[in-house]
Image (tube, rainbow, N blue to C red):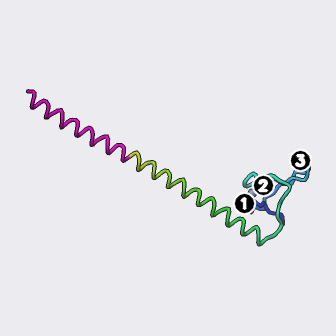
Amino acid sequence: MKVCPRCGSESLEYQPWLGEIYQCKDCGYRSSFIIEDGKLSKEIRKEFRRGKREKAQKLTLDKRAKMREKMLKLFVISILLLIGTVFIRIILKIAG
Ligand SMILES: [Zn+2]
């Protein structure tokens, strides 16, 4: 059984015209180096999936952090606006 060493997929396409090269249909890996061990391929698949999940989690966290930053900025701006209007009212009272 031939397995992709990057993602552990078994859907490898043999491309002899490129010089004994295999291409993985799942992750696009292309090389003459492939593995043929069932146990190892299972491990690779597991690691690959975990890596993907970790990447997805990191993206979500980044997005959340950015949103929080945006909210904080909006909050600060509205506070400044509020203080500004209060100041203008006080100034108008003093002047008028
Ligand atoms: Zn692959």
Q: Please name the residue that numbered disc 3 is placed on.
A: 18
* Mark 2 neighbour class, 10 Å CA radius: few under 14, some 14 to 19, many 20 or more: many
Secondary structure of the residue carrying numbered label 2: strand
The residue under label 3 is which amino acid type? Leu
In whole angstroms, how far apart are the C-alphas of marks 1 and 2? 9 Å
Residue positioned 10% across, 27% down in the render: 95
Residue positioned 72% across, 60% down in the render: 7
The residue under label 2 is which amino acid type? Cys
Secondary structure of the residue carrying numbered label 3: helix
Q: Is residue 42 magenta?
A: no
Verify CB contact (< 8 Å) between mark 1 and mark 2: yes
Secondary structure of the residue carrying numbered label 1: loop
Foreground residue among 87 and 2: 87
> Within the displayed image, which quadrant is ligand 1 positioned in?
bottom right
- Left or right: where 29 falls relative to 75: right
The residue under label 1 is which amino acid type? Cys
Q: Quadrant of the C terminus?
A: top left
In the picture, the disc for residue 7 is 1
Q: Please name the residue that numbered disc 2 is placed on.
A: 24
In whole angstroms, how far apart are the C-alphas of marks 3 and 1? 21 Å
- Left or right: where 71 falls relative to 43: left
Q: Is mark 2 within 8 Å of ligand 1?
A: yes
Q: Is mark 1 within 8 Å of ligand 1?
A: yes
In the rendered image, the vertical position of residue 66 relative to residue 84, given as above or below: below
Q: Looking at the picture, how far across and down is residue 13, in whole percent?
A: 83, 54
Q: Residue furthest top?
A: 96
Q: Is residue 82 magenta?
A: yes
* Mark 1 neighbour class, 10 Å CA radius: few under 14, some 14 to 19, many 20 or more: many
Q: Looking at the picture, how far across and down is residue 66, in whole percent?
A: 45, 48
Q: Which residues are magenta?
A: 71-96
